[in-house]
Amino acid sequence: MDTVKRPDKRAERSRRTREKVIQAARELFVAQGYGATSLQEVADRAGVAVQTVYFVFGNKRTLFKDVVDTSIAGDTEPVAVMDREWFRAACAEPTAAGQLRAHVRGTSEILGRVAPLMPMIASAGATDPQIAAQWPDGPDPRYVVQHAAAQALAGKPGARPDVSVAMAADLLFCLLSPQLYLLFVQDRGWSQDRWEEWAYATLTAQLCTDAAAGPSQEGPGPEVGPGL
C-alpha cells in the first residue's frame, strides 16, 4: 500500500514567515531607505518577533540581499532567471518578433518590481560597503541573461542578419535597463504598459527586419499626460 506523503506544515509556515518578512522589509526599505530601517520595524510590520527575523536572516545585510533577489525573481524560489518558465518560453518562440514581445513582457514585470529599489540599492551600498560583497564579482548577471536572449534570437525568422549576437545583447542590456525604465516611468510619468510598447517597438526596429517589425515599430503617440 502506497504511503500518502503529507505536506510539511513546519516548512510551509517557515516559507510564509520568510515571505512576510521580505515583503515588509521591501516596503520599509523603499519608503525609508536601508539605513533608516531597523529590523525591529521590519518585524513589527511582518507581525513576527524580531528574534525570528534574526533567526531566519541573521542580519540586515542578508535580508537586504534577499529583498533584491526575490524582487528580481518574483518569488522566494531559488530559480535563476534563465531557468524561469517565462524566459524559456520567450526563447522558444519561433520568430524574432515573437521572442522580443515575450522577452520584453517578462522583463517589464521584473523591472516593475526591481526598478523602485534602485535608489535604495545605491544608498545602501554607499552607507554599508559590505553589502556589495554579498554579490560575487564577475559578469553582470543582467548582461548574462540578455546575452542568452540574444543568442536565442539569432537566426530566427525575422531577425536582422546584419546584427551580431554581441550587438543584440548590448541593445537588450541597455534598452531594458532599470535606469532607462525609471527615466520613462518614474521621471516622465509613463505607464508600465506604455513603456513596454515603446521598448518592444524600439527593439524590433533595431533587431528585426521591416516586415517582421510590423506597424508597431512606430511606437506610442505623443504624450498627453502623466501615466498614460
Image (cartoon, grey):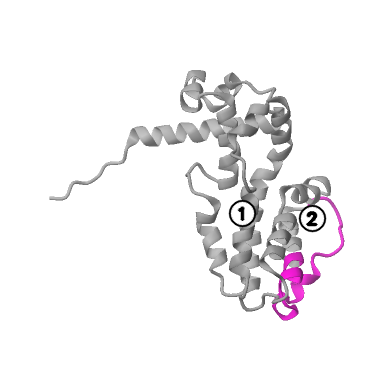
Compared with residue 164, is residue 183 higher up or lower down, i.e. above or below?
A: above
Residue sitting nearer the eye, 140 or 219: 140
Residue matched to label 1: 144
Compared with residue 99, is residue 178 higher up or lower down, i.e. above or below?
A: above
Q: Position of residue 201 (x, y in %)?
A: 75, 67
Q: Residue at x 76, y 47 (%)?
A: 179
Question: Which quadrant, please, contains the C terminus?
Answer: bottom right
- Identify the secondary structure beneath mark 2: loop
Asked if residue 140 is among those painted magenta in the image, a careful observer would answer no
Figure quadrant of residue 91: bottom right
In magenta, the rendered stretch is 202-228
Residue matched to label 2: 228
Figure quadrant of residue 28: top right
Q: Please indicate, yes or no, whether residue 48 appears anywhere in the rendered image.
A: no
Which amino acid, by three-letter code, is at mark 1? Val
Residue 168: mark: none
Q: Residue at x 53, y 30 (%)?
A: 21
Q: Position of residue 98 (x, y in %)?
A: 62, 71
Mark 2 packing: few (<14 Cα in 10 Å), some, or many (20+)?
few
Furthest residue toward left: 1
Q: Residue at x 61, y 39 (%)?
A: 68
* Total count of labels: 2
Determine whether, in the image, residue 180 is placed left or right of residue 4: right
Residue sitting nearer the eye, 146 or 106: 146
* Structural distance between the alpha carbons of marks 1 and 2: 32 Å
Asked if residue 206 is among those painted magenta in the image, a careful observer would answer yes
